[in-house]
Image (spheres, rainbow, N blue to C red):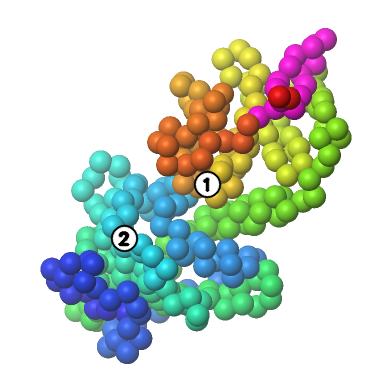
Amino acid sequence: MHVVEKNLPYNLRSNTIDYSAVPTLHYLGNYVRKLPVNMARMMENAYDWEHLPFVHQSSFSSIELIESGTWGWRAKASLPPVGSDNFQIIELLVDRRKNYWATTVLAGQGEGIQIHTQAKELSGDNIEVDIRFYLPQAPAEPSQSDLILNYLQAQYGQLYDEDLGLMEGRQNALNQKQKPIQAEASWAEVLIGRVIDMDPAQSYTIEMGSDVFAVRHWQERWVVHSAICPHRLGPLDNAKIDSDGAIACPWHGYRFDIESGKNDSGKCASLKVAPKIVERDGNIYLEPITS
């Protein structure tokens, strides 16, 4: 990985990891963790710059992509608290063949820190990550190394706690989509419950074939919308409905109107068309939309 070069335009930087430079860095220590996920989800997560301010809100406030590719990505991240001038220009380079990626803080808070991660498959659904922390040079005071290492170990422990929910959730959603599709007749009408028994504060999740929908109470009525974000299959069943009738994916922040299903930015596909919600004889039902 590169030692940070001052004033070098990002598009002139190499997009490959410079392993020969690693011995010249000051090694702080590492953080090793076993994770109950497969390698595909782990590598997908490494490439996923977009989730940082949504899944890791205590570490990132917002992020703006500079450039990306199969080699990795570079982005400018704003750091908490919101409204401060704290930022980082982050570069993440991936060696996909080795399941290895290396991160450099090119500018901003923590400039020069490098973090190299080696992922290793233990079994089909279990991996181990060895995260190694480096500085361009040793601090003037040796005690500073321990302080920086302790901070980074704690931060990465929290980051992986948070990432684990995303990676497991995504795998579960992919598994759900692979379920055999039921015949439409088998869910021609679905009883959700008696109105008198239903809790307006609860989200009722209903599976219909490979699709999942959420029945929610909003503005004194029951509504239904897809419980799956079309971007990366993020969970929408408990996403807060704002005053405009919109929900946001907790993984990447894409917002959708619960009635039309449209994404407000136009950068993401619309939600899956929801079944019709019907109140009859004191009960709430879902009925497929027929042409």
Q: Let me know if residue 174 is in the magenta part.
A: no
Which residue is label 1 attached to? 231
Residue 108 percent location from the top left of the image: 22, 60
Q: Let me know if residue 279 is in the magenta part.
A: yes
Q: Which element carries disc 1, helix, strand or loop?
A: loop
Graded by Cα atoms within 10 Å as few (under 14), some (14 to 19) or many (20 or more), the crowding at tag 1 reads some
Residue 14 percent location from the top left of the image: 28, 76
Residue 138 is left or right of residue 123, and the answer is left
In this rendering, does residue 243 appear at all?
Answer: yes
Q: Which element carries disc 2, helix, strand or loop?
A: strand
Residue 115 percent location from the top left of the image: 37, 73
* Nearer the observer, 201 or 188: 188
Q: Earlier in the sequence, mark 1 or mark 2?
A: 2
Which residue is label 2 attached to? 67
Residue 187 is left or right of residue 111, and the answer is right
> Which residue in the rendered view is the most extreme toward the left?
7
Position of residue 272 relative to residue 137, above or below, is: above
Residue span colored magenta: 274-289
Residue depicted at 28% across the width and 67% down the height: 105
Of the residues shown, which amino acid type is indicated by label 2? Glu
Q: Quadrant of residue 218?
A: top right
* Nearer the observer, 158 or 11: 11
Of the residues shown, which amino acid type is indicated by label 1? His
Graded by Cα atoms within 10 Å as few (under 14), some (14 to 19) or many (20 or more), the crowding at tag 2 reads few
Quarter of the rendering occupied by the N terminus? bottom left
Quarter of the rendering occupied by the C terminus? top right
> Which residue in the rendered view is the most extreme toward the right?
186
Residue 28 percent location from the top left of the image: 35, 79
By secondary structure, the bulk of the magenta-drawn segment is best described as: strand
Residue 181 is left or right of residue 247, and the answer is right
